Image (cartoon, rainbow, N blue to C red):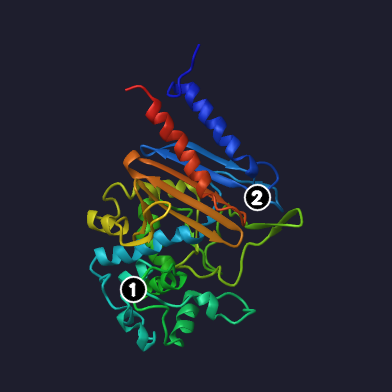
Amino acid sequence: MLVHAGDGAASRAARDAEIERLMQPYTGDVPGASVLVLKDGKPVFRRGFGQADLARGTPAGPETNYRLASVTKPFTAAAVLLLAQHGKLSIDDPVKRWLPELPQVAGAITLRHLLSHTSGVLDYEDLMPKPYEGQILDAGVLALLAKEDRLYFPPGAQYRYSNSGYALLALVVERASGMTFADYLRRHVFEPLGMHATHARVEGGPAIPHRAFGYSAQDGGWTQTDQNPYSAVLGDGGIYSNIDDLALWDAAWYDDRLFDARTRALALGRQVQVASMPEATYYGFGWRIADGRQWHNGESIGFRNSYVRWPERHLTVIVLSNRNDPTPYELATAIGTLYMADEEAAPD
């Protein structure tokens, strides 16, 4: 009997088999990945592949917590927007209102500029002495920038992706709320959403349960490369989470459980154009935006992640991995395409 693409169980089995084929490089005794597909708010694919910890032989699963790297940025932006929503600050505040240590040249920079990567602040990675002993913190980023009375360009003049800007935003959250950044996220984002396994990782703070360790390919094998001097900066990339908790986070962007409509519109709005080819692409506040799609990738030593949403289709694909390469954006979009193709092929 001929089986059509949209035919129930057969379609699901074929789709799952194709996902497993796509995930083959992550299968076995290698650094792995966890994959979640949400459709209409429900998990329709939820699997781990490969290993979370090669030394202990710990398999990756839905509960595995990965360093999100820059998939942290939507959370940092959300923390600022929640403070604005509650009247604690304005996104048009000058950053020097909250961080007066910054030099005079930063006087025209607003929180809006930082959120949209249009501030012109220098990259802290380029300002750090080499080699750098230990790990720099968000406060250390501020200390470096306080010594540099120069910018890449006048605030608002152009877009330049900035880890420094998001480290500064984490410090703004602390000063406007009177709480540490980690505590603010825990009390105002993670706990209200039930994201109990998610943490902004602080040395000496809560242990990360079911933690994945990062690896890099080297000499035909894998070397643990879990941390580097930048890994303790929280605002640009310091959150650990798993696919189950991120399902709760994803749901919060469809209703008022955490954000009001204005806050969601700001975060997911086209604040600045990033590229015109191969498609028009924009940055919101913590999100990349294109027609029908919202996403953010995360890249740090030992970790590569992609979180892609098609909100009009109520479809989300999240791929978290504990290896240095590749960034799984094309993988996530390929998985999403499988579901969209089935949806389009299904009979009315």
Question: Extreme right residue here?
Answer: 219
* Quarter of the figure with the C terminus: top left
| Image: 328 above or below 95 | above
Instruction: Give the left or right position of residue 315, taking residue 223 as reference.
Output: left
Query: For the point 46% across and 88% down, which residue is it?
Result: 147
- Residue that label 1 marks: 157
Query: Disc 2 designates what residue?
Result: 31
In depth, the one of 62 and 163 nearer the eye is: 163
- In this view, the residue in front, 301 or 150, is 150
Q: Residues within 10 Å of mark 2 (few under 14, many from 20)?
A: many
Q: Position of residue 326 (x, y in %)?
A: 59, 52
Q: Which of the 4 image quadrants contains residue 25? A: top right
Which residue type carries mark 2?
Pro
Residue shown at the point (42%, 46%) measured from the top left: 247
* Residue plotted at (39% across, 78% down): 153
- State whether residue 186 appears in this view: no
Q: Is residue 311 above or below residue 121?
A: above
Q: Position of residue 218 (x, y in %)?
A: 73, 58
Q: Who is closer to the viewer here, 13 or 4?
A: 4
